[in-house]
Image (tube, helix red, strand yellow):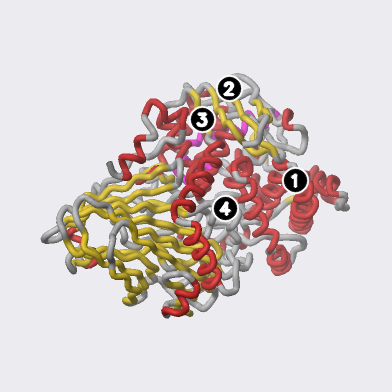
């Protein structure tokens, strides 16, 4: 029985919905392109290719360099921490890829483990390969693999594992490989790697262990920019040989000597043992999955998509992440820029709300990234001739400064990013009830953005206007009073007033005046995208005002909400397939009471974005934008879907009042769905159970015993 068989035994089809997440179908190498598997813990992100022991792409949160073409600060590849190779009677697998067949990969979402299998056929023997890969959540600097080998005939077998820097921009800064050093450090080898442009360093150190081989010859080899530990032995049929590797990766931002700290951490892991590290990781995932979202009555496929979204969102965030996360998390591939790993508004708007209920400590770390760089936000405001805090459109992971490639036209007018950041701080304070965070973090940040709004708004005969700005749709030219910007500004000013009052901090009396008189572009009761809006203009179907309704929660009259929903839903087919907002159409349709339309638009706006290997959610819907590269998992789309399940369909609007007041409307679910249930969400520092039953008011009930 192989690892793949054991992985599936624990999840019989008739038990999947009640006992744990539904795993995606295995991948068997059908010849069509699909994004490689993504394995991550929020600090480390790996693209693990289908052929075992072939190095993929490694990203490390906070590790940055100079982009080789744009010359901007960019998240950059780190050396691949789990390199390896196999030789049968002198035939090296990496030199004979034509001898590799029977490729198969499977993902166990319940424990965050990927298994990759293949067969390597040499002249006189065949080896069956199974590689287990995971990134530890309990010890977030660790990437781990176990290579399992069986042969069908006696042969001279060599298996290696190590660190592979081949093809990675940058250079070796220090290598820990001499015998005295590594024996003293209790590691196989270590590496300090410097990024392109000499911007930053990271450290890697690894240990290996060969089991069940009997007598073997162990050597430390160096070829090109690959350092590996090789084990050579006489292999026999009927036995399974296991090579285990653990590699620690540390960014310079976490330690000024990252290679030495990596050596310490991986030596500790070696002392505790691979089995303990794996068991700890499995326990962490069991804890996270207590927040699994169950879709009662929905088709099995929707539960599969919900489980995949839950998995990728949680796998890509961690409290150890110093540089927040990008909109692709740590998932990079070679054919796309992935927005250079910059931190953008999508994170605060789409990821923070659902993740606050699931991993509040990870959200605190993401928000702390913004807080650490308040001086950069203040400097950015000054450079634009404004006051307060103006957060950059594309924030550099290490500096918090504007990092958009020149000319950076979006950064000229995309003002809403500061408002999105402010809303995230207020949202976290409301949901967690953390008074210290409110006083020391949320109130200063939101007040700083409110001061920026005051300096950005222009008093006119109409009231206060925000001119020459840009909403969610990135158009060629700015416009006056973009609906989403002005709606978000109103919410920010309201948040600033109440947070400062709660913190005992002074409020600017102008905030209330600007909030009350800030212009919203309307036609009758419809809130339109901006002054002078035309339906047939560039990106005219973009539903910016609906974002102001949900998830932003800008106060409008019932008639304004209804007519604005109807107006933009009528243009849904012209927009769905685009990134970010498409995932929210199901909620907007549900709020009109049309459950069939909600189900259809949820499929069009999210279901059809999930494509390829292991249910990865793409940035663009491939049938609508076939010219776009396949890029995912894309967290704006995932976060929008998760936010729909936790807040939109249940009709919950978190605020600073009692939790019982959060349910503002009766639950309206897509057709066929009976309820949304979650056994544990973190609310006000305690675990609560969510039940959102169709036609009823959603409830959040405290659990008697914390999970």
Q: Is residue 321 left or right of residue 516?
A: left
Expressed as whole percent of the image width and height from the top left, the position of residue 323 reads: 59, 61
Expressed as whole percent of the image width and height from the top left, the position of residue 586 reads: 52, 32
User: Which residue is denoted by mark 1 in the rendering?
Assistant: 434
> Of circles 2 and 1, which is in front?
1
For the N terminus, give its image quadrant.
top left
User: Which residue is denoted by mark 2 in the rendering?
Assistant: 693
Circle 3 — which element? strand
Query: What residue lies at 50% left-to-right and 36% top-to-bottom?
Result: 571
Please state the extent of the stretch shown in magenta in the rendering.
Answer: 558-582
Expressed as whole percent of the image width and height from the top left, the position of residue 15 reads: 41, 27
> Which mark, residue 294?
3
Q: Badge 4: few (under 14), some or many (20 or more) residues near its Cα, within 10 Å?
A: many
Q: Is residue 336 left or right of residue 516?
A: left
Q: CA distance from mark 4 to mark 2?
A: 31 Å
Q: Is residue 641 left or right of residue 652?
A: left
**Furthest residue toward front:** 214
Residue contact at pointers 2 and 1, CB within 8 angstroms: no
């Amino acid at each position: 029985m192989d690892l793949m068989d054991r992985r599936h035994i624990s999840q019989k089809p008739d038990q999947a919905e009640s006992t744990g997440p539904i795993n995606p179908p295995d991948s068997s190498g059908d010849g069509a392109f699909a994004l490689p598997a993504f394995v991550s813990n929020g600090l480390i992100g790996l693209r693990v290719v289908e052929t075992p022991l072939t190095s993929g792409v490694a990203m490390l949160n906070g590790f940055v360099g100079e982009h080789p073409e744009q010359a901007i600060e960019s998240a950059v590849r780190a050396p691949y921490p789990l390199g390896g190779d196999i030789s049968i009677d002198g035939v090296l697998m990496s030199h004979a890829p034509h001898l590799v067949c029977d490729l198969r990969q499977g993902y166990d979402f319940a424990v965050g483990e990927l298994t990759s299998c293949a067969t390597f056929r040499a002249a006189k023997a065949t080896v069956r390969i199974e590689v287990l890969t995971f990134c530890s959540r309990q010890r977030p600097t660790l990437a781990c693999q176990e290579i399992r080998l069986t042969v069908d005939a006696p042969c001279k077998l060599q298996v290696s594992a190590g660190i592979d820097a081949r093809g990675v921009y940058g250079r070796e800064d220090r290598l820990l490989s001499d015998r005295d050093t590594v024996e003293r450090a209790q590691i196989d080898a270590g590496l300090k790697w410097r990024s392109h442009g000499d911007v930053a360093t990271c450290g890697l150190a690894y240990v290996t262990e060969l089991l069940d081989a009997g007598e073997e010859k162990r050597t430390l080899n160096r070829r090109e920019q690959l350092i590996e530990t090789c084990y050579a032995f006489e292999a026999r049929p009927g036995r399974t040989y296991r090579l285990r590797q653990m590699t620690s990766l540390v960014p310079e931002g976490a330690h000024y000597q990252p290679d030495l700290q990596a050596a310490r951490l991986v030596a500790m892991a070696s002392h505790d043992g691979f089995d303990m590290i794996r068991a700890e990781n499995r326990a962490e995932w069991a804890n996270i999955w207590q927040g699994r979202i169950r879709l009662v009555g929905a088709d099995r496929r929707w539960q599969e998509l919900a489980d995949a979204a839950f998995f990728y969102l949680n796998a890509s965030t961690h409290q150890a992440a110093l540089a927040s996360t990008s909109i692709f998390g740590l998932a990079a591939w070679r054919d796309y820029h992935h927005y250079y790993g910059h931190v953008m508004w999508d994170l605060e708007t789409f990821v923070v709300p659902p993740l606050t209920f699931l991993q509040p400590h990870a959200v605190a770390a993401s928000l702390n990234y913004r807080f650490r760089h308040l001086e950069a936000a203040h400097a950015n405001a000054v450079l634009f001739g404004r006051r307060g805090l103006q957060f950059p459109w594309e924030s550099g992971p290490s500096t918090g400064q504007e990092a958009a490639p020149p000319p950076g036209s979006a950064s000229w007018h995309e003002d809403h990013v500061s408002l999105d950041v402010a809303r995230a701080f207020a949202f976290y304070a409301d949901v967690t009830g953390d008074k210290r965070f409110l006083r020391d973090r949320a109130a200063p940040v939101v007040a700083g953005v409110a001061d920026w709004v005051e300096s950005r708004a222009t008093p006119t005969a109409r009231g206060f206007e925000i001119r020459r700005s840009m909403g969610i749709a990135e158009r060629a030219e700015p416009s006056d009073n973009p609906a989403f910007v002005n709606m978000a500004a109103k919410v920010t000013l309201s948040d600033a007033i109440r947070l400062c009052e709660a913190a005992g901090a002074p409020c600017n009396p102008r905030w209330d005046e600007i909030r009350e008189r800030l212009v919203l572009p309307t036609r009758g009761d419809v809130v339109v995208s901006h002054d002078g809006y035309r339906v047939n203009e560039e990106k005219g179907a973009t539903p910016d005002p609906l974002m102001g309704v949900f998830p932003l929660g800008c106060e409008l009259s019932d008639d304004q909400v209804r007519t604005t929903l109807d107006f933009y839903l009528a243009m849904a087919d012209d927009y769905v397939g685009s990134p970010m907002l498409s995932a929210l159409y199901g909620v907007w349709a549900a709020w009109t009471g049309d459950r069939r339309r909600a189900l259809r638009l949820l499929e069009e706006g999210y279901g059809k974005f999930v494509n390829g290997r292991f249910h990865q959610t793409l940035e663009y819907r491939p049938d609508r934008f076939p010219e776009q590269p396949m890029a995912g998992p894309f967290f704006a789309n995932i976060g929008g879907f998760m936010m729909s399940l936790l807040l939109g369909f249940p009709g919950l609007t978190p605020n600073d009042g009692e939790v019982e007041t959060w349910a503002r409307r009766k639950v309206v679910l897509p057709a066929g769905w009976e309820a949304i249930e979650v056994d544990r969400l973190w609310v006000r520092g305690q675990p609560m159970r969510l039940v959102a039953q169709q036609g009823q008011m959603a409830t959040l009930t405290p659990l008697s015993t914390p999970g």
